[in-house]
């Protein structure tokens, strides 16, 4: 079980819960006219139990409300519009929620060591022109070189 899989289960919580109530073997849903299916396994059921436990332990009203809204299938934008929270704070809390679920899955033994090691720590920057205008590529390259020059001019790298 990977972090991406957990994110997908959390994102499709409402559809999976409905399929579980109807005693189906998989949750079937459509995105952009394409049919997707998430099989209901013991791992999915464990994720649901963990979400319910987190909801029971959580004591901040804002976070409880956000978890309920995620479970109802609300979009990120609609939740942000209803809550007095900045975009960065919202996504930070959502990331912490996913990480908490992932940590609980590790503790319960649903995540293998190899899956943990395969998780990427950061994203690689891609300066290829694929799908990007020349101006955007140039701005990205310049922003990195300006940041590099600013670090070089700080005086920290001077030899005495």
Image (cartoon, rainbow, N blue to C red):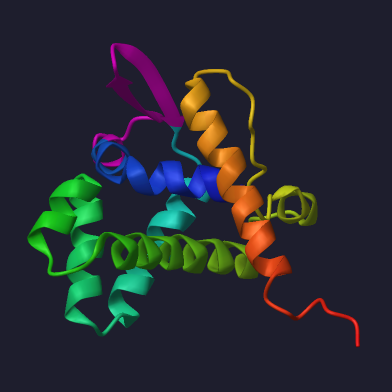
Assign the C terminus to one quadrant of the image.
bottom right
Task: Answer yes or no: is residue 10 visible.
Answer: yes
Task: Answer yes or no: is residue 109 visible.
Answer: no
| Closer to us: 104 or 92 | 92
Q: Which residues are magenta?
A: 19-38
In this rendering, is residue 140 above or below 108? above
Horizontal side of residue 49 vs 124, given as left or right: left
- Identity of the residue drawn at 28% across and 44% down: 17
Q: Pinpoint residue 13: horizontal percent, then vertical percent.
A: 31, 45
Q: Pinpoint residue 74: horizontal percent, then vertical percent.
A: 18, 46
In this rendering, is residue 122 above or below 159? above
Verify whether residue 106 appears in magenta: no
Horizontal side of residue 80 vs 13, given as left or right: left
Q: Pinpoint residue 46: horizontal percent, then vertical percent.
A: 48, 56
- The mark total stands at 0
- Identity of the residue drawn at 48% across and 31% down: 136
């Amino acid at each position: 079980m990977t972090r991406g899989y957990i994110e997908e289960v959390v994102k499709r919580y409402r559809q999976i819960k409905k399929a579980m109530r109807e005693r189906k073997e998989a949750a079937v849903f459509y995105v952009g006219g394409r049919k997707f299916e998430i099989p209901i396994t013991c791992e999915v059921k464990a994720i649901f139990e963990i979400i319910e436990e987190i909801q029971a332990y959580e004591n901040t009203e804002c976070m409880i409300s956000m978890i309920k809204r995620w479970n109802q299938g609300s979009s990120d934008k609609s939740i942000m519009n209803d809550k007095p929270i900045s975009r960065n704070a919202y996504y930070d809390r959502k990331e912490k929620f996913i990480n908490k679920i992932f940590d609980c899955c590790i503790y319960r033994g649903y995540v293998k060591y190899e899956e943990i090691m395969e998780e990427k720590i950061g994203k690689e920057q891609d300066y290829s022109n694929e799908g990007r205008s020349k101006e955007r590529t140039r701005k990205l390259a310049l922003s990195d070189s300006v940041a590099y020059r600013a670090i070089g001019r700080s005086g920290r790298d001077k030899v005495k």
